[in-house]
Image: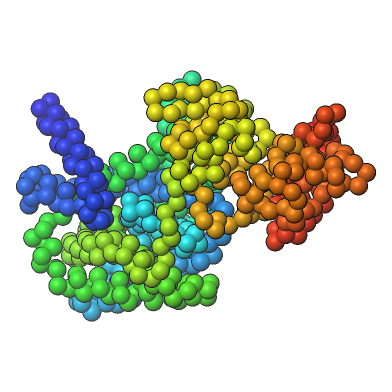
Amino acid sequence: MFAVDRLVLLAGILLVLGIASSKLSTRMGLPVLALFLLVGMLAGSEGIGGIAFENYAVAHGVGTVALALILFDGGLRTHHGAFRAVLAPSVVLATAGVLLTAIVTGLAATALLELSLLEGLLLGSIAGSTDAAAVFAVLRSRGMRLPARLATTVEAESGSNDPMAVFLTIACLEVLTGRLDAGPGVLWLFVRQMAVGAAAGWAVGRLTTAAVNRINLDAAGLYPVLTGAAALLAYGLAATFGGSGFLSVYLAGILIGSRRLVFRRGVFLFHDGLAWLAQIIMFVLLGLLSFPSRLLEVAAPAVLVALALMLVARPVAVVACLAPFRYGPGELAFVSWAGLKGAVPIILATYPLLLGVPGAALMFDVVFFVVLVSAMTQGWTLHAVARALGLLRPPEPEPPVTLEITSLRDVDGDIVEYTVAPGARAAGRRLRELALPDGVVVAMIAREQRVIPPRGSTQLLPGDLVFVLLRPAVRPIVDRIFATAPAGAPALPAVEFPLRGSTTVQDLEDFYGITIDAPKETTLDRLLRERLEGGPTAGARLTVDAVTLVVADLSDSGIETVLLMVNPEGTPPPERERPSRDSPEPIA
């Protein structure tokens, strides 16, 4: 019993040290994965902790589960639309790019370590993938804001290239051990892994979304547990039938995260914490596996292998794969340097050890050293490289908090908590002066330690917490009102949203950056009455400058609701079915 108590104590200490090191990494700029590995190394048999651990089977199992949870969290946070926009370059880089990286690195390892060609290709395959956990940790912990296409490409490629690295590693091992002939057998293995992995991920993602939104669980805290079970199911289902579990779990995460879920915010917070816990456990455990004395023995050739990987193999693969998709030189250079190595190569390096492949211990030590070099150089300098290449963008304001309406399952609404920024359009305005979309309600205002009942005469001050009830469709519009209004902010994209008929032309300019050639005090009700031939009728539309106004709701006292449609490049949108008076046209 004492041994169990001591094990629990040691686990708690290591977790606390891991969490503390994450805070230290933010201040020092050191990649958090490197600190986690160092914590494990210090706790190991050759460190101050003296913990003897050399069970590669346990490390492989724990690392696989942890990586599956990390990839699932990364998939949840990958926007489906953004992922589709970079699908082609990401897939090419995650497949052909990993193959090219493995070949060039393998040739270098063959020459530097005196390995056979197949053994060198095995080492190159193990080290060939970009680690999703490492990339997500560096990009998010440093608060780097990159161009949307570039950031999505880096994250999507890092999350989707593990299956190719696993396939190459397994194929090399199967050929090396004589269980598979090079040729059609390898091709069939690739097709089976990708097809089964994609099918399992798609099925689990779709079924989980339907289950979460339809099942009526008594405890809201069970919804994140259900999605966590789905992550394990996606991996296990694909792996059991000979597919890629990593591809399956990442694809399932994308499908689930791209749809509206019951208790969505709770699900995301749960998986964010779970992913951090998985990173700490995985990297600390892998650090325990290392032996610093053995690492020093292979330091010289391992550094050369790392340099060949970072400075030759990865850039060659990136340029060959992404240049046809019109990425600029700076973007290609950044993606090349963003090929961070992390837990995946170390986990894959346990495969030869488990199979008893000759020279497996040397491969493990070299791969571990390569990961350390990558983390300490690429991870530490990635922010500086992005700045030097002119790719960094100004940080966005802190996103408002969403309080979901979980007790009303069929209500398509959120309660969003905004902090009124000093430069926000709403700062200094009274509630009745805000041109909020129709149906948006300010539910509560908190100022310092007081709760202020919202009235039309209530003035909003910088620092106020404003709780707004809204539909998710109009969230981007409302964000513009309460967020900081930067100078020269771009106009709205082609969107549509309902406004009250009492909204003035001045309101449109102040809150949405929309300019209409009419007196500033003119209301939308008055503008439509004056300019519509034959008077306003339900569904009648008027195109003024870059917008189209549609009469959505008409009463005896005037036009109650106007649907405002921002036209792309100032051109009128295509004709749509006219709404009835009783059924205003919905927002797309």
Residue placed farthest to the bottom in the image?
A: 111
User: Toward the viewer: 340 or 25?
Assistant: 25
The percent position of residue 212, horizontal first and vertical second, equals 53, 32
Instruction: Quarter of the image for the N terminus: give it.
Output: top left
| Residue located 29% across and 54% down the image | 343
The percent position of residue 495, horizontal first and vertical second, equals 67, 49
The percent position of residue 290, horizontal first and vertical second, equals 16, 55
| Residue located 64% across and 49% down the image | 509
| Residue located 12% across and 56% down the image | 291
Q: Is residue 336 above or below residue 454?
A: below
Residue 136 shown left or right of residue 50 in the figure = right
* Residue 46 appears in the rendering: yes
User: Toward the viewer: 131 or 537?
Assistant: 537
Colour scheme in use: rainbow
The percent position of residue 489, horizontal first and vertical second, equals 55, 56
* Residue 355 appears in the rendering: no
Q: Is residue 306 above or below residue 192?
A: below
Residue 255 shown left or right of residue 276 in the figure = right
Instruction: Quarter of the image for the C terminus: give it.
Output: top right
User: Toward the viewer: 421 or 315?
Assistant: 421
| Residue located 58% across and 25% down the image | 455
Residue placed farthest to the top in the image?
A: 218
The mark tally for this picture is 0
